[in-house]
Image (cartoon, helix red, strand yellow):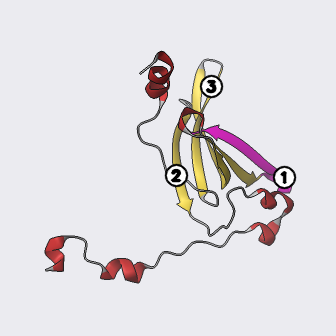
Amino acid sequence: MNLVESVVNEHLKEKTTEIRPGDRVRVHIRIVEGDRERIQVFQGVVMRKRGGGIKMNFTVRRIGAHGVGVERTFFMHSPRLEKIEVISHAHVRRAQLYYLRGRTGKAARLREKRIDTRAAAAEPETEAEAE
């Protein structure tokens, strides 16, 4: 392993949240103001996910005050990124959801991905329950 790979592996986070475009997420980011730090929450829809390894980033879009769209890009392995909570998943057919920029109100909604709870309940969890 060369010097560059060792530095990159040192800064990679061991456990990252698996997110996909269309997910509604709540991103907790550490903000430094002077000598104080605080956690700021940014909640919105993941529009895109780019890159790989240490350079992986994702863009989140939300509608701010007075109907103005706000997009913010976060690095997945940033030390300022506290945690990512996935609120819901949406059914999307694109990798980049740029078409949301031109939509407002109900037109900007995404169809929620439904999980079949009956099929999950019918499957046995362990081999002992199967017998």
Query: Disc 3 and disc 1: Cα gap in Å?
Result: 25 Å
Q: Residue at x 59, y 39 (%)?
A: 56
Is 90 above or below relative to 77?
below
Q: Amino acid at mark 3?
A: Val
Q: Amino acid at mark 1?
A: Val
* Secondary structure category for the residue under label 1: loop
Is 8 above or below relative to 74?
above
Q: Which residue lies under the disc numbered 2?
A: 85
Q: Amino acid at mark 2?
A: Glu
Q: Which residue lies under the disc numbered 1?
A: 68
* Secondary structure category for the residue under label 3: strand
Q: Is residue 91 magenta?
A: no
Q: Is residue 76 magenta?
A: yes
Q: Residue at x 57, y 64 (%)?
A: 89
Q: Of callouts 2 and 1, which one flags the residue occurring earlier in the amino acid sequence? A: 1
Query: Disc 3 and disc 2: Cα gap in Å?
Result: 21 Å
Q: Residue at x 47, y 24 (%)?
A: 5
Q: Which residue lies under the disc numbered 3?
A: 32
Discs 3/2, front: 2
Q: Nearer the viewer, residue 7 or 89?
A: 7
Q: Residues within 10 Å of mark 2 (few under 14, many from 20)?
A: some
- The magenta stretch is 64-77
Q: Residue 27 at what x, y percent from top left?
A: 59, 46
Q: Nearer the viewer, residue 108 or 76?
A: 76
